[in-house]
Amino acid sequence: MTCPGFRFAAVGLSVAALLLSSCALTKGPDEQVVLRLIAPRVQAVTATRQGDVKLVPPRAQGVISQQRYAYSVGAGGALQQARTLMWDRPPPEYLEQAMAATLQAEGLHVMRSSTPGNSVIRLSPTLLQFEERSGPATHASVVFEVEFARADKPVVVRRYCGRAPIPSGSPDVRAAAFGEALGVAVKAFAQDVPGTAMADRPADCASSLPSSRR
């Protein structure tokens, strides 16, 4: 993409803002900027449950499994990576940390290495989206799925999503937006933590994910 200089006289403000936001990701200082996501605060739905859950490390494919900042321009735009912006850890690790904190806040013991028994629910998350999306309003978008499995029960797969506005190109603002979006998605996941009323499950958010990445 070629970033414009001062040729915005005939360009609408919304289009100009979109181009400037994209240029901020591809142009700028040569030094790498490391973003540190602040883990979202966890508020238990109910902390009275007890039991064990097996949390499998989240999977992710392509650029969202890497530390380089990912973004897309326009509806359904191709996923790209910023030249100088990087996360301090791969995004799947943020998801694992947030999920583990949520499960522990719900009074559940999180197992990571031992083999679960028949009564232990196995949670297998997949991070589908962790990117900045530009459009009418630039925002952070986080989407993940969780497979709930137990030896004596059918497998259930549910999807969770969160988004938060990115009002400026500041690294701190971007990191805060992703923390907020992750918090929204994980809060929805908390409603489906084993033992919670399934009637409160969030709506499927497949519409927020481009068809090429579903």
Image: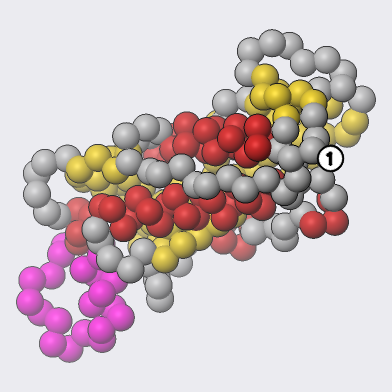
Which color mode does the image show? Answer: secondary structure
Residue 24 vs 156, above or below: the answer is: below
Q: Quadrant of the N terminus?
A: bottom left
Name which residue lies at 9% across and 49% down.
Answer: 29
Any part of residue 166 in sight = yes
Instruction: Spot the residue most to the bottom.
Output: 10
- Could you tell me residue 16's position as x and y percent? 23, 77
- Could you tell me residue 31's position as x and y percent? 11, 41
- Could you tell me residue 78's position as x and y percent? 40, 54
The number of numbered discs placed on residues in the rendered structure image is 1
**Front residue (pair 105, 4):** 105
Question: Which residue bears the numbered disc 1?
Answer: 195
Any part of residue 214 in sight = no
Name which residue lies at 69% across and 11% down.
Answer: 114
Magenta range: 1-22
Secondary structure at badge 1 equals: loop
Residue 53 vs 18, above or below: the answer is: above
Question: Is 160 on the left or on the right of 62, as rendered?
Answer: right
- How crowded pointer 1 is (Cα within 10 Å; few <14, some 14-19, many 20+) is rated as few
- Could you tell me residue 68's position as x and y percent? 31, 39
Q: Quadrant of residue 88?
A: top left
Name which residue lies at 12% across and 54% down.
Answer: 28
The amino acid at mark 1 is Gly
Residue 122 vs 115, above or below: the answer is: below
Instruction: Spot the residue most to the front.
Output: 48
Was residue 18 drawn as part of the magenta stretch in this picture? yes
Question: Is 184 on the left or on the right of 158, as rendered?
Answer: left
**Front residue (pair 150, 206):** 150
Was residue 12 drawn as part of the magenta stretch in this picture? yes
